[in-house]
Image (cartoon, helix red, strand yellow):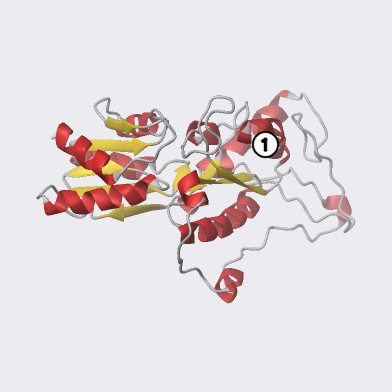
C-alpha cells in the first residue's frame, strides 16, 4: 500500500543516482491502514525507504503554499544531489482548500539550479567518477554520452563490479554527498521561540494546530514556542540540540507513535522528551495540545 509499493525502485534510484521527486500524502498503517484518514505514518519510512546505506532527503510541507514551494525546492535538491527527494504531506493538507501566496513563475524560474553536465569528449565521460562528496553526473540521453544503469555496485562507467575498494568508495559517497552538505538541505521554522521556556516540536498540518495552541497558552501566561522541521531528513539535529540544551520542557506532537520523537531523543541526547501521539485517523486539535502542555507543567 502507498509508498511501500515503490520501495524497490526507490532503492534503484538511490544506487543509480537518478533524480526524482516523490510526493507522498502520508497515511496510517501498517498495510492498508486508514487510507482516507489523516496520519503521519511514513516519517520513519522516508528516512529509509529502501534497504542499504545512503542519506535520504525528505521535506515536509506545513502550509498550502509550502505544498508548492517545497515541491519546487525538491526538484532543485534532486538535481543537486542526484537522488530521490520526498515531499511529505498529510490528508489535512492534501484535502485543504484555501488561499495561498505562492511565488510567480518568473521567481520560480530564477531559482532553478541547472543540473551538472559533462561537456568534454564522449570518450572522457565517466558518470560515476566523482569526488568523495559529490553526486554522479548523468548527461541527458541521446547526446552521444553513454553510461549504464544498474542496481548493483558499479564502477565509474556504471557497470557492475565487486572490486573491494570501488564498492566501499561508492557506498560511502552515496552517504557523504548529502551528509557533508546538510547546510544546503536544512530548513526549519521557529515560531515564538525567542523567549520560550516550553518547546513544542511539530511538523506538517499538526504545526498549524500547535501554533493555535501556543497562542492560547501565551494568553494563559505560558511561554510556549514551536520548532517546526521543514526538512525532516536529514533532521536539523544541531538546532534541536541547541534548543533542548537550554529548554527543559519539550513536547513532540505527531500523528504516529513517536517516529520523529525518537529522532529528537537522539539529537538532544535526552530520554525525558515528552510526546503527544495520535493514530486513530483524526487530527490533533489545539485543545489537546494545550491540555497536554498543562499536564506536563
36 sits to left or right of 188? right
214 sits to left or right of 233? left
Q: Is residue 242 visible?
A: no
The percent position of residue 251, horizontal first and vertical second, equals 26, 36
* Rendered residue at 67%/38% (across/down): 14
Q: Quadrant of residue 147?
A: top right
* Rendered residue at 49%/38% (across/down): 37
The percent position of residue 201, horizontal first and vertical second, equals 31, 42
Q: Is residue 279 visible?
A: yes
Question: In the rendered image, which residue does mark 1 sit on?
Answer: 10
What secondary structure is marked by label 1?
A: helix
* Rendered residue at 52%/44% (across/down): 58
Quarter of the image with the N terminus is top right
Q: Quadrant of residue 72?
A: bottom right
- Residue 108 lies, with reference to residue 97, above or below; the image says below
- Residue 161 lies, with reference to residue 199, above or below; the image says above
257 sits to left or right of 146? left
99 sits to left or right of 251? right
Q: Nearer the viewer, residue 113 or 170?
A: 113
Quarter of the image with the C terminus is top left
- Graded by Cα atoms within 10 Å as few (under 14), some (14 to 19) or many (20 or more), the crowding at tag 1 reads many
The percent position of residue 276, horizontal first and vertical second, equals 30, 33
Q: Nearer the viewer, residue 21 or 162?
A: 21
Amino acid at each position: 500500500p502507498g509508498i511501500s509499493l515503490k520501495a524497490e525502485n526507490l532503492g534503484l534510484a538511490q544506487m543509480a543516482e537518478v533524480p526524482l521527486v516523490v510526493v507522498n500524502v502520508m497515511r496510517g498503517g501498517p498495510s492498508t491502514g486508514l487510507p482516507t484518514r489523516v496520519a503521519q505514518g511514513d516519517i520513519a519510512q522516508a528516512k529509509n525507504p529502501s534497504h542499504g546505506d545512503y542519506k535520504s532527503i525528505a521535506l515536509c510541507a506545513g502550509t498550502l503554499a509550502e505544498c508548492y514551494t517545497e515541491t519546487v525546492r525538491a526538484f532543485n535538491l534532486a538535481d543537486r544531489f542526484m537522488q530521490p527527494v520526498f515531499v511529505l504531506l498529510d490528508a489535512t493538507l492534501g484535502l485543504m482548500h484555501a488561499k495561498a501566496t505562492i511565488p510567480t513563475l518568473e521567481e520560480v524560474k530564477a531559482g532553478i539550479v541547472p543540473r551538472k553536465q559533462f561537456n568534454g569528449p564522449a570518450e572522457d565521460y565517466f558518470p560515476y567518477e566523482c569526488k568523495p562528496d559529490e553526486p554522479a553526473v548523468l548527461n541527458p540521453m541521446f547526446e552521444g554520452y553513454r553510461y549504464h544503469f544498474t542496481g548493483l555496485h558499479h564502477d565509474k562507467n556504471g557497470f557492475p563490479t565487486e572490486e573491494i575498494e570501488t564498492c566501499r568508495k561508492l557506498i560511502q559517497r552515496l552517504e557523504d554527498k548529502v551528509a557533508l552538505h546538510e547546510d544546503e538541505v536544512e530548513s526549519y521554522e521557529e515560531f515564538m521561540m525567542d523567549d520560550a521556556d516550553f518547546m513544542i516540536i511539530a511538523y506538517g498540518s499538526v504545526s498549524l494546530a500547535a501554533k493555535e495552541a501556543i497562542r492560547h497558552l501565551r494568553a494563559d501566561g505560558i511561554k510556549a514556542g514551536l520548532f517546526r522541521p521543514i526538512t525532516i531528513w536529514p533532521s536539523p539535529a544541531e538546532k534541536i540540540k541547541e534548543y533542548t540544551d537550554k529548554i527543559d520542557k519539550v513536547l513532540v506532537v505527531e500523528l504516529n507513535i513517536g517516529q520523529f520523537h525518537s529522532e529528537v531523543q537522539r539529537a538532544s541526547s535526552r530520554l525525558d522528551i515528552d510526546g503527544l501521539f495520535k493514530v486513530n485517523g483524526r487530527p490533533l486539535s489545539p485543545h489537546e495540545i494545550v491540555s497536554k502542555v498543562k499536564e506536563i507543567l
